[in-house]
Image (cartoon, helix red, strand yellow):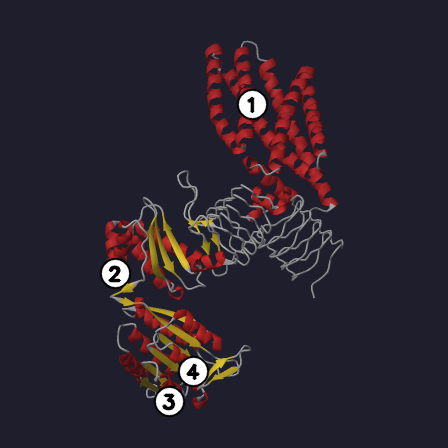
Amino acid sequence: MPQDYSGQNIRGRSFKGQNLELADFSGADIRSADFSGANLIGANFSGAKAGLQRRWAIFLVLVSWLLMGISGFFLALTGFLMESLIFQPQKGSEIAYQTTGFAVAIILIIFCFVTIRQGIQAGLGVIAITIAIAFALAIAISIAITSAIATTSIIATTAAVAFAFAIAGAFAFAIVFAIAFAIAGAFAFASAIAITIIFAVAFAGTKAGVIAGVFAGSTAGAIALFSIYISLHALEGDPKHVLIREITVAFAAFQGTSFRKANLSNANFTAATLKSTDFRRAILTRTSFHKTLKLYRGRPGATYLQKTQVCQVLVTGFGQDQNFDRLDLRGVNFQGAILIDASFVGADLSKANLQDADLSRAKLVQAQLDGTDFTGATLTGAYIRDWNITSDTKFDGVRCEYVYMRLPTKENPDPLRKPDNNKEVFKDGEFGDFIKPIFDTLDLYHNQGVDPRAIAISFKQLAENNPAAELRIVGMEVRGEDKFLIRAKTESQADKSLLSQEYFENYNQIKALTEQELQRLIAEKDNRIRSLENMVNTALQRPSFYAQTVKHNNSTIKTILILASNPKTTPSLRLNEEVREIEAGLRRAKKRELFNIRQRQAVRVPDVYEALLDLKPQFVHFIGHGSGENGLVLEDETGNERLVTTVALANLFKLFANDIECVVLNACYSEVQAQALAEHIPYVVGMNKAIADQAAIKFATGFYSAIASGESVEFAYKLGCNVIQLEGIAEHLTPVLKKR
């Protein structure tokens, strides 16, 4: 039963590490509550109030005011030092003093201007150069006029201190004002000016009277206003002042509501107040922030909340014409958002919620879309070149009249439109059918110097390192000068992002090798490297689309379908070990590239005929239990036994006799089924009695090692039996071969 805290006052309470899945915190006061590391999957925080308890807010405001006063003191000191240089120069050195004073003023003006335009980092960078020039000039003038080294040192020191206090004071004031404003609101503005002027006048008044006080106060006030301007823009999310914002938010979130490291997947924060809230390292998969208040005042850490435009879309649902190129948006919740003409080029939107979003004319080029939910979304006019969708990407109910397979250009504003006829559009449900064949392909896009040898070696290594991915090349395409696409078929559940990453890591390393190192690497491989290299070269020389069914030595790739069944009511079998040994035997064989293993676990009756229909295998290998005359044991919907009779099994395989070359029934007492199937299938192997796991595994290993080496079925059968015998197992006569 989910816990109910709706409407409650739970300020300051600790829920650290607790399991609060689906808990209801709607309308609750959760200020200063600690949810660190908690499981909050599906929790409801709609209308909740997060942030700081009043006592902590008052404490932080007082601290900020204290720091503001200290900053005001230094700004006042800056004004006094500048006033001393300009209005109270030492006799005999008036020009040197005044020149330096005006130089400091000019440098400060330049600093303020550059900082406003480009940010604090740029301001400091430009000022460093200006300072060096200005001080060199001031010293040169001083020496030329007075020839007094001592006076020059005093001037330089005074100017340096004034400038240092000005910069440090402005930067510190910007931060502490932002903190005060983030916590106390608009009241901080008036207090900031008042505190600054009080300190300025008080300090200057003790030094130089009314003139000094007015000048110092004016200087301090001007720098304070500049700092306030920077602070307000930083709080609004201006990317130029992100440093100040990060420091401010970190300070203001002290003792605020903490969701650090919490799992907030599918949590609902609709209309919640999230000021001074810590989201660092939280899991925010499909978390709803619709209509939240002060989300940008929270501490985002490295989550997608650190991007201002992302927060705006999360809160308002409006992101038209926004640029999200190459952002990490994994798990973001843009449900129902208006994203017309938005750009997501190269962005990672894996597991994102885009249900009912309007993505008309959106650029989804090279976007990562593993598990992304487009249910009910509008994709009309979207640009989808090289987008990385998977079988987990959802397109149910997508509204899409047409898409473009390329980005537009001035010469071609409608590049590769689908449907091809501009007068046609996709009907309801047709877009899903159009996009489905792309699910199980891995697109390896090269755009910086195509090296055929590096491609050949890298792809071969990728296939060898990931046999379960079942990689095979199905197409190549040249896309203009120095751009090349190699498309590979993969197993539907393969992680294409990891495969792509591994491939390009190898590819870039191989490209960096010297010619001698590369030749040595090729020498260690076999001639399949050269064969694939030739394919790439052929494709590069023929710019038109190049695709073929991959063949080796004039032999088409053959599929081995493994069907495994071990109902929970039957003795346990070492299914995974047998599959692993078969795969290992194929990897070691010299013609392994001619075979493609596919498997189905816990098979039921529909799984058998659906796999035969989908895969059209040449070899079918059954691992499971047999029951003699009663048939083979499959599973039912509950995981219990389901017997399939010999007659029914034979009639099924009769329908696929044109495709299947051999069936191996690695199950006890399966000779009777083997005999029946052999009336339709050229070769069938069965067991004339019970066979132990070890013997069954050894037979399969020897059998498929021979098949993958190019040997006949009869030879493979004999080798399989011999491998049992070589291992000292007294069951080498159990397998029997039946021929049509």
Tell me which label, 1 or 4, sits earlier in the chain. 1
Q: Where is residue 24 shown, x and y percent of the image?
A: 70, 58
Residue ID for mark 3: 688
Q: How far apart are marks 4 and 2 (CA)?
A: 47 Å
Q: Nearer the viewer's eye, disc 4 or disc 2? A: 4
Tell me which label, 1 or 2, sits earlier in the chain. 1
The image quadrant of residue 228 is: top right
Tell me which label, 3 or 4, sits earlier in the chain. 4
Badge 4 density bin: few <14, some 14–19, many ≥20, Cα 10 Å: some
Q: Where is residue 263 shown, x and y percent of the image?
A: 60, 57
Q: Distance between the residues labelled 1 and 2?
A: 66 Å
Tell me which label, 1 or 3, sits earlier in the chain. 1
Q: Which quarter shows the N terminus?
A: bottom right
Query: Which amino acid, by three-letter code, is at mark 4?
Result: Leu
Query: Which amino acid, by three-letter code, is at mark 2?
Result: Glu
Query: Which amino acid, by three-letter code, is at mark 1?
Result: Ile
Residue ID for mark 2: 524
Q: Nearer the viewer's eye, disc 1 or disc 3? A: 3
Residue ID for mark 1: 109
- Mark linked to residue 649: 4
- Relative to 541, 487 lies left or right: right
In what element is the residue under mark 2? helix
In what element is the residue under mark 3? loop
User: Residue at left 28%, top 64%?
Assistant: 551
Q: Residue furthest top?
A: 92
Q: Nearer the viewer's eye, disc 3 or disc 2? A: 3
Please name whichever residue, 239 or 651, is drawn nearer the observer in this view of the structure: 651
Query: Which amino acid, by three-letter code, is at mark 3?
Result: Asn
In what element is the residue under mark 1? helix
